[in-house]
Image: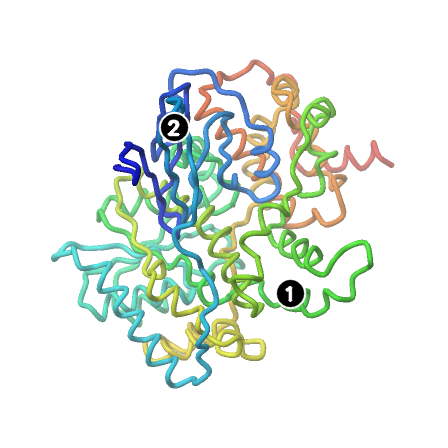
Amino acid sequence: MQCPDGSVGLELGRDRFGRVPLYWQQQQQVLWFSSRLQLLLAGSPVDINAAALHAYTCFSYVPTPLTPAQGIQAVPAGMQQTWQLDETGTLQWAQGRLQEWQEAGDQINDEPTAVRSLQTLLKDSICRQTADLKDEPVGVLLSGGLDSSIVAALLVQLGVRVTAYSLDFGVPEQSELDYARCIADYLNIPLVTVDASAKRIRRAIAPTAAALDLPFGDGVTVPLFLLKQRAAQDTSVIFNGEHGDQLFAGWTNKPLIAAGVYSKLVSNEQSPEDSFYQQYLKTFHRLAGYERHVFQPDFLAQHEFPNPVGWLREALDPQFSTAILHRLRRANLMLKGAQNIQPRATALAFAHGLRVRSPFCDVPLAEWTFRLSNELCLQGSCEKYILKRAVENWLPPEIVWRTKRGMGVPLTLWCFNDLWHDLGIWLNPAVLQDQAHLQPDIATRIVSGSLGGPIQGRRIGECLWLLLMWQAWRKAMLKEADLPHSWNHPFWLPAQLWRRLNQWQNS
């Protein structure tokens, strides 16, 4: 890159949706960069970044610019970084945001106008993302929800040869398969169901951690690995419905709207904005605030962790969006989307030689959504209202208008049954003690319900899985050998007997 003063520099940028990560490391006057973290880890000792580990336990991913490896940084989504030599020959760098997600001045309030515009934008997006396809078949990851169903419908409208792929967790009461079958039948496309039972999940934990490159503690990671592994047998291009919730203010926004409305009622010790940030932090349902129970005392004494709310401030900054739904959508795009959903989807696709396409990751479409009035996104209790109105003639009404459900990954059920023994291996107390980060008995305390009141039911499985995937990432990326600590297995008894013994000891 030729700089204005005639010097030569390097410029790195990353797209706003965060689809492909970008890492860099400076060693004296040499700058190394890569889209794969493990390429920068190769051949040198790695020190765990304490702040990154703490942030991971709060969010289930490591927020940029941190990475789990000390000395390696990540370029945030939508940012541009420039390096050049100063007059002394020292390498200097600067950072700036390329473009912002922000509320537009001309808000759309007319529903028919919005419906027509949105239909056109959706069709234009799918056309752009299929422009390089000829007659090759494609796959679509069909969850049974609205967003992936829209993508499947648009592909069928274009005449693309589509096969749908859905997960079967083997738990009928949590299954979305009936909805996926309904959509496949309606669109007349084949549906392949992929076994995501606990036995298959056990075998796929380690390869998933290796494929992800970064630690991701969301329970969908391994099931999605299996889904893409199966799809790769038939196609090289896979579509998903990711980012529909982020663009159209779906899922978990109603409690935050209430928090925003009543934030002025907080005590004098906390400002309304800080209260709002804390409410948003709670939507991650992880271990923020439990540091004293999660980390070893020496580790806590050696490190001063930043308040996790600090990672939220820019994304929720009211200077870019004043309407509450626009603020939340900006935050969801920058945090849950660009730092979690998109890089995770890309890594899992690349691991199986797939090209991943996300039609909702379309700049004209995304920028247009910041012109929507709050009422068109959330009407009464109906979330994503305008999206549903725009596609109601493309899909069955029972798909369009049903109440949103998240992907029902039965983590707690798995942890107390098929993964019980494996859990004790991944979170072995002696191993954790040697690593000197996590409390050795953290798994026992979570399972017994003694870590804290809110960590009950499904949250037990989510927290155990969060820590399990961190350990799996360490083993895959740091090439840590198995340690002979099987004698210290915390769950040597079956789950039911272990619970009874624990209750008796604490009575």
- The answer to whether any part of residue 251 appears in the image is yes
Residue 461 in the image: x percent, y percent? Answer: 61, 44
What residue do we see at 58% from left, 65% from top? 253
What secondary structure is found at the residue carrying circle 2? loop
The label shown at residue 341 is: none
Q: Nearer the viewer, residue 270 or 246?
A: 270
- Residue closest to the eye, 261 or 186: 261
Residue neighbourhood size for the residue with mark 1, other residues' Cα within 10 Å, grouped as few (<14), some (14–19), many (≥20):
few
Residue 343: image quadrant is top left
Q: Residue 259 versus residue 254: which sits nearer the camera?
A: 259
Numbered-mark total: 2
- Residue shown at 70%/48% (left/top)? 456
* Disc marking residue 255: 1
When the figure is inspected, residue 94 is found, relative to residue 220, above or below; the finding is above
**What kind of element bears circle 1?**
helix
Q: Which residue is labeled 2 in the image?
A: 86
Residue 415 position (above or below residue 433): below
Residue at 39% across, 48% down:
18
The answer to which image quadrant residue 392 occupies is bottom left
Which quadrant is home to the C terminus? top right
Going by the image, does 9 lie left or right of 382? left
Horizontal side of 452 relative to 400 (left or right) equals: right
